[in-house]
Image (tube, rainbow, N blue to C red):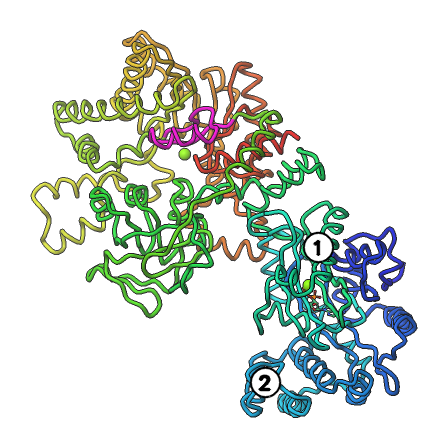
Amino acid sequence: MGWVYAFTETEGLGKELLGGKGFALAEMTRLGFPVPPGFTLTTEACRAYLEHGAFPEGLWEGVRQQVARLEAATGKRFGGAGGLPLLVSVRSGAPVSMPGMMDTILNLGLTRAGVAALAEASGNPRFAWDSYRRLVQMYGEVVLGLAAEGFERLLDRAKVLAGAERDVDLSAADLERLVAAYQEHIEAQGQAFPDDPWRQLEGAVRAVFESWNNPRARTYRRLYEIPDDLGTAVNVQAMVFGNLGDDSGTGVGFSRNPATGERGLYGEYLKNAQGEDVVAGVRTPQPLERLRESDPGLYEEIADVAARLETHFRDMQDFEFTVERGRLYLLQTRTGKRTPEAAVRIAVEMAEEGAISREEALSRVDANTLPSLLRARIDPDRAPEPVAEGLPASPGAAVGHAVLDAETAESWAGRGLPVILVRPETTPEDISGMYIARGILTARGGMTSHAAVVARGMGVPAVVGVAALSLNLEERSFRLGDRSFKEGDVISLDGTTGKVFAGEVALSEGGSGAYLQRLLEWAEPHRELGVRANADTPADARRARELGAEGIGLVRTEHMFFDPERIPWVRALILAETEKEEREALDRLFAFQRADFMGLLEAMDGLPVTVRLLDPPLHEFLPPLVELERKEAAGALAPGEAKVLAQVRQLHEVNPMLGFRGVRLLLVRPEILRMQTAALLSATRALMEQGRDPRPELMIPLVSTPEEVEQALAVVREVFAEFDLVLPVGTMVETPRAALVAGAIAPLVDFFSFGTNDLTQLTFGISRDDAGHFLPRYLDARTFAHDPTERLDAAAVGRLLEIAVREGRAANPNLKLGLCGEHGGEAQSVHLAQRLGLDYVSASPFRVLTARLAAAQAAL
Ligand code: ADP
Ligand code: MG
Ligand code: MG
């Protein structure tokens, strides 16, 4: 095993050693594509270098041998005093594609003597000096670590001095002067550009190896979950020149359109340029399509290459090429990145073409990206400059009038105005305003903040943590960067990209319907897990059903309590002093809930609807303590408010998540439990009388002992008897204790539903609303591999589930098992649910598609 291999001698070696680029270059070489010759320094060499801080023994001997072979193959000399100089590119290439993460150096090996030789041999001094100035600049930036701006400034000045508009308008003499200025600039910073090709090569290889650990690369690896210990390979390849004149050029091609998935060659081409010019946006390239008229022969050749590459690599390819004096050379190919729409269309069409199997098509689509297909979006071609950016917390785009609190959101939305809720951050009191808003914008908070989690759950687009946002609630105004806005001004946001715009931005509807439909049809027969939705309103339920939900796994009854028409009655119930007051409030709420349940059961006729009894602490329905205390201090309490304040103080909890909520609340105030059960039974009865097929199930939240379940059941059974109707009753398993005593709880109930949101928080001892303080750092440092509130933690939470499944089923063989946390709509978590042998998962409506596809993938 050596450290270095020619593209022609890598038979049997894989990507992990050669890197993706090296592997593809070798593969294309073997297949007979026109690839300039070269060799690869392996990832093993990189790892050895990074470990010892020095090149491993034998590495440079190997490199020297390979360079000698390149000289023989090309008839040029490295460092080339005399004849034509051999120039090479030095290119990084990690085992996993990390586009743009590490830099490439072109034209390496060029020296002052070489420039003269190149000018002479090519008959084109401008070309020789252009190549040299590019090398000095790239080397200065990548190897010597100097800022790009310094070079850009000098380049701009050279253009001004020469009266040149574009880089290509600079003459050989202009470029020669520019190189001198570059060199002065480099020396002024205590550095030197080596005039020795071997020292250039050594510096470049070292820089590529070390770039593995640059912050951009680390961040990219974290975001895409790429291990930190792979290392990168280095490819050294003979240069071909796209900057030799108008019969030369460089371009990028895709075997299918990466934005839409449409079949056929797609790409860009730039005449008389070197590769970096396209990416760097120095000049705007033309669509490849144009070559069809201007150079049909070349176009055909490229189209043919695209098709052959795709056939060989069995997926859409993104390839880079250069044309030197009319001859096409391939410099790279890789599986192309694509939008979620394109991923679906390409997978479906490739299966229909017979290139891949349907199963493979299913496995190629990342189920977690499906929700974004359903959302309206901002057309990037028509979007103006954003005024601010934040975290893309919940995908989709929204346009609306900015409102600065939940109450205003509700009242304006009630008048039919689309609103965007703009807040410093959100709290549970904002729920109803968030629900009714088209979009949510916050100044603070991370991807797991209250705003982010709730918005994703509701399918409301959201951008959170916008540092440039500041609010002035007194004056009802806010600023985004240096622009100021009043409440009511129209703004737009894109929760897919995190961008925020002033005014109304044009939206387009989410597409790809037909292809997605076909993919899901293929998925269905494989799926073993049932898929339900978490839905609180008939509209959500209908939407979920359209998307293929087979029932509702979680109705959060309290969400209905936040309705402005109802909250006074919830407050009346909490504050009731006499039995009469309490009775009246309960009767009102009974009527509301009965109507809600009828709507939900109707929308899900024939399918199960799991209704969770009241879960949150009561004080969430009362005005916030601080607000009342501020009023009190100002002597501005309204007549009834003193009583409210006393009650709020009494109900105030230091840690409400662990407080007076769930089954605890239902046992202490059984009249609420009775009222909710009766409302559900009454709705069911009414629908049955209409000849419908309602299938409600009752669910008790936050239990931790069998006794709690027994006592709640005793009350529920009394109501069943009153109505002479019995429903399936189950319990949430969302405390670690409930999971551990599942064997004792299971015989009492018909089903368990794993509430993995709370179970995760309680297992880790973190609150997702507060996790923003440390979670970003934890993820950065890989203290946590994933955000456990997003992806179900297999090691501990999964273990609790496994115990509960095993012991629950042993104690009650008829026990049904579901999962209704946010995780029910996350692909990896669905895979875990499948391994655990659950009966179904329940996801928010927008994630039902994710759950369906992921369940099929898990069963493949
Ligand atoms: P990246 O990983 O950023 O895509 P590459 O190593 O592919 O970097 O290099 C960027 C560009 O430099 C390529 O697209 C190609 O146009 C140009 N390039 C690289 N090697 C050569 C070469 N041997 N001859 C001509 N151009 C090259
Ligand atoms: Mg490239
Ligand atoms: Mg819960």
Q: Is residue 163 visible?
A: yes
Quadrant of the frame with the C terminus: top right
Q: Quadrant of residue 219?
A: bottom right
Q: Is residue 551 magenta?
A: yes
> Percent position (x, y) of residue 56?
83, 68
Query: Residue 535's quadrant in the figure?
Result: top left
Q: Amino acid at mark 1?
A: Ala
Gap in angstroms between the C-alphas marked 2 and 1: 36 Å
The reply, left or right, for residue 270 in relation to residue 203 is left
Tell me the residue that label 2 is attached to.
155
Question: Is residue 622 highlighted in magenta?
Answer: no
The vertical placement of 471 against 860, above or below, is below
Q: Residue shown at 13%/51% (left/top)?
A: 632
**Magenta segment:** 531-555
**Residue at image location 83% in from the left, 58% down from the top:** 29
Residue beneath disc 1: 303
State ligand 3's quadrant: top left
Which sits in the foreground, 13 or 558? 13
Q: Is residue 520 above or below residue 505?
A: above
Amino acid marked by disc 2: Leu
Which part of the image, by quadrant, shows the N terminus?
A: bottom right
